[in-house]
Image (spheres, rainbow, N blue to C red):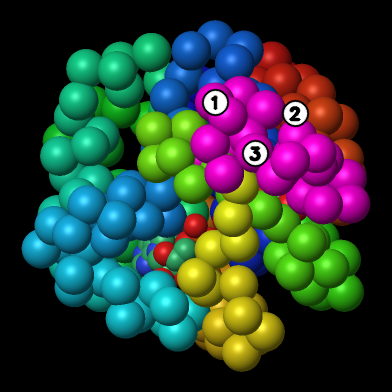
């Protein structure tokens, strides 16, 4: 699979990407996860990214492209990839198109996950994430809770709320999405690559994506 997952914060991109990656070994590449690991590790890209992330703004395109140019050429991408949270601006989409063109790779399609705003707000305030940067399993205290002692069911480490999950940062992330990322829907529709998946359970979305791949 070579799919871009597009959707507002909390639309379920990470959840769907993890389920899809279990089907055929296609690798989930989440720019958010990569950046959070860089922040935690205290690397230069992490130091540059932290302030933008905590306030809910996008990290500069140049930093994201530096990371993704390298990541997409790593060996595990040969099996396929699920791009989760990238591209997020028109310049990123253009740079991705150029990079894939150079690599001789075409996308299957861009899956746009459409979820109403009230559902998104509810999901983001109730999401919890494994603190282990090698795991980053996603939970939800309502629909998919962690272990009763607040640890990850997969790796046993504490499950936490992310730094960008304050109400102020969530609202800023939604505004940033509408302004900078939603235009990608029209961009990819114009290229004939867009498929819409409307407010489904994550498992149903995966089934629909599988059908789209066959069709
Ligand atoms: P990132 O980590 O990508 O955050 P995001 O896009 O805001 O997406 P989320 O991870 O919040 O949501 P999601 O759609 O993956 O939903 P999830 O599956 O977790 O980015 C963070 C920051 O990094 C950005 O703000 C920016 O600063 C920076 N950044 C990252 N990429 C960048 C880029 N390319 N350019 C510039 N800056 C970049 O689900 C949410 C919750 O809902 C969970 O609790 C889940 O359990 C639950 N849930 C999911 N699906 C369902 C369902 N169907 N039914 C019920 N519950 C569900």
For ligand 1, give the image quadrant: bottom right
127 above or below 118? Answer: above
Q: Which numbered mark, 2 or 1, is in the foreground of this view?
A: 1
On the image, numbered disc 3 is attached to which residue? 151
Q: Which numbered mark, 2 or 3, is in the foreground of this view?
A: 3
Residue 50 counted in the magenta span: no
On the image, numbered disc 2 is attached to which residue? 206
Q: Residue at x 43, y 24 (%)?
A: 27
| Tags 2 and 1 touching, CB below 8 Å | no
Residue at the front extreme of this rendering: 149
Label 2 sits on a secondary structure element that is helix
Label 1 sits on a secondary structure element that is loop
On the image, numbered disc 1 is attached to which residue? 155
Mark found first going from the N terminus, 2 or 3: 3
175 above or below 191? Answer: below
Residue 147 counted in the magenta span: yes
> Residue 20: where, in percent of width, then height?
62, 24
Mark found first going from the N terminus, 2 or 1: 1
């Amino acid at each position: 699979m070579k799919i871009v997952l597009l959707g507002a914060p909390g639309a379920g991109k990470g959840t769907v990407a993890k389920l899809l990656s279990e089907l055929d070994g296609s690798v989930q590449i989440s720019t958010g996860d990569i950046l959070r690991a860089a922040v935690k590790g205290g690397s230069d890209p992490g130091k540059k990214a932290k302030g933008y992330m905590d306030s809910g703004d996008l990290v500069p395109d140049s930093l994201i492209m530096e990371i993704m140019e390298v990541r997409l050429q790593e060996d595990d991408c040969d099996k396929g990839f699920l791009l989760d949270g990238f591209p997020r601006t028109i310049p990123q989409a253009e740079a991705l198109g150029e990079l894939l063109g150079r690599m001789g790779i075409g996308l299957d399609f861009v899956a746009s996950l459409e979820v109403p705003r009230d559902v998104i707000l509810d999901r983001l305030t109730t999401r919890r994430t494994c603190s282990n940067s090698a795991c980053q399993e996603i939970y939800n205290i309502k629909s998919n809770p962690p272990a009763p002692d607040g640890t990850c069911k997969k790796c046993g480490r504490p499950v936490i709320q992310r730094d960008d999950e304050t109400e102020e940062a969530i609202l800023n992330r939604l505004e940033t999405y509408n302004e900078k990322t939603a235009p990608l829907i029209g961009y990819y529709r114009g290229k004939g690559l867009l498929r819409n998946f409307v407010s489904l359970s994550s498992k149903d979305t995966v089934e629909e994506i599988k059908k789209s791949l066959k069709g």
